[in-house]
């Protein structure tokens, strides 16, 4: 049995952790375990600094064959933990799924400083990392530039089927047309379409809009009874919420900024596997995955969202075709069970 111990500052129930570590749990003769527990985050408001306090499971680390260090785990407070792992001569995988070491200036995440801090500590342990993995070719190219490291492996986000509820048939005749925007979204990422959404509501009395994963309602919709907000939950419950709503259309309106071009196509995978057709921003993860008008809609311009949404309203035939083709794309290319060799090869290189 090959044992991999996970070191992460992300909640075990988030997509960031589940999608990156569960593939290893699906390999034959491989077992994964959590090697630490996050106790608290420590923020220094005066010095624009942040750190994390963790409780380490030394037994799991000692008994494992390899350690998977994820995202922004390398910090001032955790570097000694990693150095001890190096002394124990454990194999090390480092994995990241976002360009966290170069966040946009306007990013308001409370963990921004934690992510920014991680770069110097990742650089410190680079000589001891056996495998450096990430999610996309575009992010790989950027990380090669950032860390001056060429041997970075792409291990894409994939559909782990047992995490998903059984998809509903979304295209039966219904009283309302349901639009969904989901994920731990920041208001900044959707601000450019709010006026368009208000116009859609004004002109179409049968439209409902659902925001899933937003911490609080958006002020512009305070008096709108056809707009609903569902607070962030675990990744699996998030998928269940999407499925229960039975959306007719999903919107992924990411801004056209450098950081977003290094994201993965996970929203396309989630929506498509749950039979939800979508309109997506023209950023790298989506225009590299989607054939416009075949398995999704690419919105080329931030000013065109109203037109693209309007075209889809009550266009049942096109919505059904988009959903069917998107599901085919996912089943043909992005099921974990058909891509296990990626993760087997990583383990075999250790």
Image: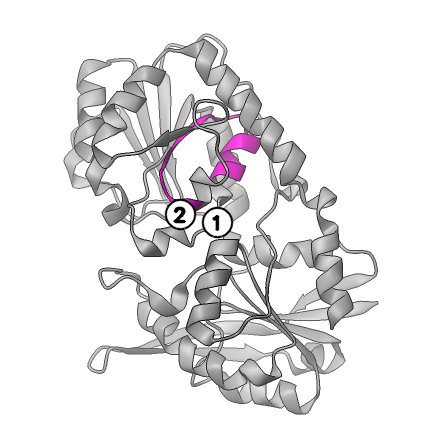
Q: Examine the structure image and report whether residue 237 is included in the region drawn in magenta.
A: no
Relative to 243, is 218 above or below?
below
Magenta extent: 268-284
**Residue at (64% x, 87% y) in the render:** 86
Give the quarter of the figure containing the N terminus: bottom right
**Residue at (31% x, 32% y) in the render:** 228
Q: What number is the disc on residue 232? A: 2
Q: What number is the disc on residue 246? A: none
Q: Position of residue 289 (x, y in %)?
A: 50, 38
What colouring does the structure picture have?
A: one colour
Choose between 18 and 141: the one closer to the eye: 141
Find numbered disc 2 in the image and state the secondary structure of the residue it sits on. loop
Relative to 177, is 61 above or below?
below
Real-space CA distance between mark 1 and mark 2, rounded to the nearest whole angstrom = 20 Å
For the question of whether residue 207 can be seen, the reply is: yes
**Residue at (20% x, 28% y) in the render:** 196
Choose between 227 and 153: the one closer to the eye: 153
**Residue at (48% x, 41% y) in the render:** 288
Circle 2 packing at 10 Å, graded few (<14), some (14-19), many (20+), is some
Q: Which callout, 1 or 2, points at the residue further toward the start of the chain?
A: 2
Find numbered disc 1 in the image and state the secondary structure of the residue it sits on. loop
Q: Quadrant of residue 335?
A: top right
Q: What number is the disc on residue 264? A: 1
Frontmost of labels 1 and 2 is: 1
Relative to 348, is 296 above or below?
above
């Amino acid at each position: 049995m090959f044992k991999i111990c996970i070191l992460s500052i992300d909640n075990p129930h988030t997509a960031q952790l589940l999608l990156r570590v569960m593939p290893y749990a699906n390999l034959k003769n491989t077992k994964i375990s959590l090697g630490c527990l996050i106790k608290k985050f420590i923020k220094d408001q005066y010095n624009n600094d942040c750190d994390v306090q963790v409780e380490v499971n030394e037994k799991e680390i000692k008994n494992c064959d390899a350690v998977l260090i994820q995202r922004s785990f390398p910090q001032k407070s955790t570097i000694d933990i990693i150095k001890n792992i190096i002394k124990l001569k454990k194999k090390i995988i480092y994995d990241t799924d976002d360009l966290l070491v170069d966040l946009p200036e306007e990013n308001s995440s409370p963990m921004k400083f934690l992510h920014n801090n991680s770069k110097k500590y990742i650089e410190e342990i680079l000589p001891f990392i056996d495998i450096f993995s990430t999610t996309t070719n575009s992010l790989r190219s950027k990380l090669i530039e950032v860390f001056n490291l060429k041997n970075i492996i792409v291990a894409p986000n994939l559909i782990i089927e047992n995490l998903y509820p059984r998809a509903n048939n979304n295209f039966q005749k219904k009283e309302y047309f349901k639009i969904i925007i989901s994920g731990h979204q920041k208001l900044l990422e959707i601000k450019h379409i709010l006026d368009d959404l208000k116009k859609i509501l004004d002109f179409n009395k049968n439209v409902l809009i659902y925001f899933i994963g937003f911490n609080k309602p958006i002020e512009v919709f305070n008096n709108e009874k056809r707009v609903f907000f569902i607070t962030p939950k675990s990744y699996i419950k998030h998928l269940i919420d999407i499925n229960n709503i039975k959306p007719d259309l999903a919107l992924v309106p990411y801004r056209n900024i450098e950081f977003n071009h290094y994201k993965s196509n996970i929203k396309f995978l989630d929506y498509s596997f749950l039979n939800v057709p979508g309109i997506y921003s023209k950023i790298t993860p989506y225009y590299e995955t989607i054939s416009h008008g075949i398995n999704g809609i690419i919105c080329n311009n931030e000013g065109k969202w109203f037109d693209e949404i309007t075209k889809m309203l009550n266009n049942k035939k096109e919505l059904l075709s988009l959903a069917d083709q998107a599901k085919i794309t996912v089943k043909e290319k992005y099921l974990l069970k058909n891509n296990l060799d990626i993760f087997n090869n990583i383990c075999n290189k250790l």
